[in-house]
Amino acid sequence: MADIASLAGSLIAAQAGNTQLQVATTLLKSNLDAEKETVLTLLGAGSPSLANVGAGIGGNINVKA
């Protein structure tokens, strides 16, 4: 009977480890995606297009002091 309990405990522990691995993988992918977006923004590759905005939006502002 102790062997069955031991086997069941091992299976539960293995399942818990698998769940932890899946969560860690998901978090790692999310962090890598965020880092990628940061790099693209810094390089200017992630700049939004101004093609679909109204006239005068995104242009230079001429301010006199």
Image: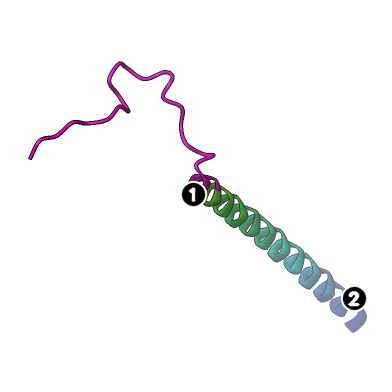
- Dot 2 alpha-carbon crowd within 10 angstroms: few under 14, some 14 to 19, many 20 or more: few
| Quarter residue 6 falls in | bottom right
- Please name the colour scheme applied to the rendered image: rainbow
Instruction: Indicate yes or no whether the magenta region holds residue 49.
Output: yes
The residue beneath circle 2 is: 4
Asked whether, in this view, residue 60 is left or right of residue 40, the answer is: left
Magenta region: 40-65
Q: Are marks 1 and 2 in contact (CB under 8 Å)?
A: no
**Residue drawn at 52 percent across, 46 percent down:** 43
Residue 29, position as x, y percentages in the image: 65, 54
**Is 5 located above or below residue 12 in the figure?**
below
Question: What amino acid is found at the position of numbered circle 2 in the picture?
Answer: Ile
Along the horizontal axis of the image, is 52 left or right of 38? left
Name which of mark 1 and mark 2 comes first in the sequence. Answer: 2
Instruction: Give the Cα separation between the discs numbered 1 and 2.
Output: 57 Å
Question: Which image quarter is the N terminus in?
Answer: bottom right
Q: Residue at x 60, y 53 (%)?
A: 30
- Above-or-below relation of 58 to 37: above
Query: Dividing the image into 4 quarters, which one contains the C terminus?
Result: top left
Image label count: 2
**In front of the other: 33 or 40:** 40
Q: Secondary structure at mark 2?
A: helix
Name the one closer to the observer, 39 or 29.
Answer: 39
Residue 15 on the magenta span:
no
Query: Which residue: 44% across, 19% down?
Result: 51
Amino acid type at circle 1 is: Leu
Question: Which label is found at residue 42?
Answer: 1
Q: Position of residue 35 (x, y in %)?
A: 56, 54
